[in-house]
Image (cartoon, grey):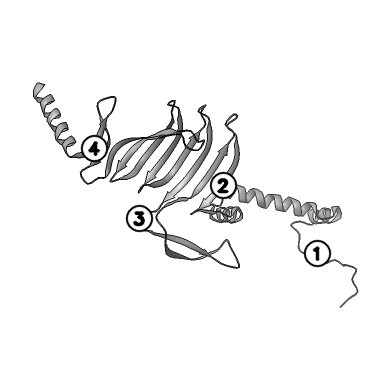
Amino acid sequence: MRYLFFLLLLWSTAAQSQLKSYIMGAKGDTLNRVDANGKKQGPWVIKVPDLRGERGYEEEGVFKNDVKEGVWRRYSVQGDLIGMESYKFGYKHGKAAYFNYQGELEREESWRAIDPQNPYDTVPVFDVNDPTKIVRFEIVKVEPNSYKHGTWRFYDPRTGRIEDTEEWVMNKPKEKEIAVVAADDMAPIDPAKAEADEEKKKVAKEKAKPKEVLEFEKKNSGKKKIKYRTGSTGG
């Protein structure tokens, strides 16, 4: 046991010697590590002071090769969770949520990060005469950054009710009309619903016929086609 403890201590000392700087956490772990190449690595705690009337806060998360990666949590100075963000390539990516100082949800965001090593994206090109129709896809170069992408929801913190919703596609508001049409076109056909719709159309059509016509058709259903005069005098 002593031998194992000695090996762990030796490994920890060797690992720390390869770091340019770090601080010791409350549990004895190393935080805010900077490696020999000057890059942030591993778990970090960042303190942001009050600035221009804005309250200060603390961030906790992981750096990988000098950029934020994974889930980062934001806390008030009092230690209350006020935000959760996801990062990729050092940019916001995926879901983010923000809370007031009572712990009540205020808004949810959705982001998309662009890889700096592959700054390209495939975008659809719509028909100018039919904005619901995609005519082709094009590959375009995109500036590496975080882009609003997906559904954003804004809540009433007291009731938890959604007050507003926004749809974004690469920092541009999504056309709701196009989204609805595209979703309907791509939706699978429900046989039961289709049959019910046809029955409704049939009933509506029957109701549009005069009572006399309905009685005549019922009386002569199944018989050979009957010729009758229409009263017209034309040829």
Q: Nearer the viewer, residue 217 or 115?
A: 115
Residue 116 numbered tag: 3
Which quarter of the figure has residue 157?
Answer: top right
Residue 235 position in % (x across, y down): 86, 78
**To which residue does mark 1 refer?**
226
Label 3 and label 2: CA atoms lie apart by: 27 Å
Give the mark toward the camera: 1 or 4.
Answer: 4
**To which residue does mark 2 refer?**
166
Label 1 and label 4: CA atoms lie apart by: 101 Å
Give the mark toward the camera: 1 or 2.
Answer: 2
Q: Nearer the viewer, residue 109 or 36?
A: 36
Q: Is residue 112 above or below residue 132?
A: above
Tell which circle, 4 or 3, labels the residue nearer the N-terminal end.
4
Q: Does dot 4 land on a helix, a strand or a loop? A: strand
Q: Is residue 13 left or right of residue 89?
A: left
**To which residue does mark 4 refer?**
21
What's the amino acid at mark 1?
Answer: Ile
Q: Is residue 118 above or below residue 193?
A: below
What's the amino acid at mark 2?
Answer: Glu
Residues tagged 2 and 4 counted as in contact (Cβ below 8 A) = no
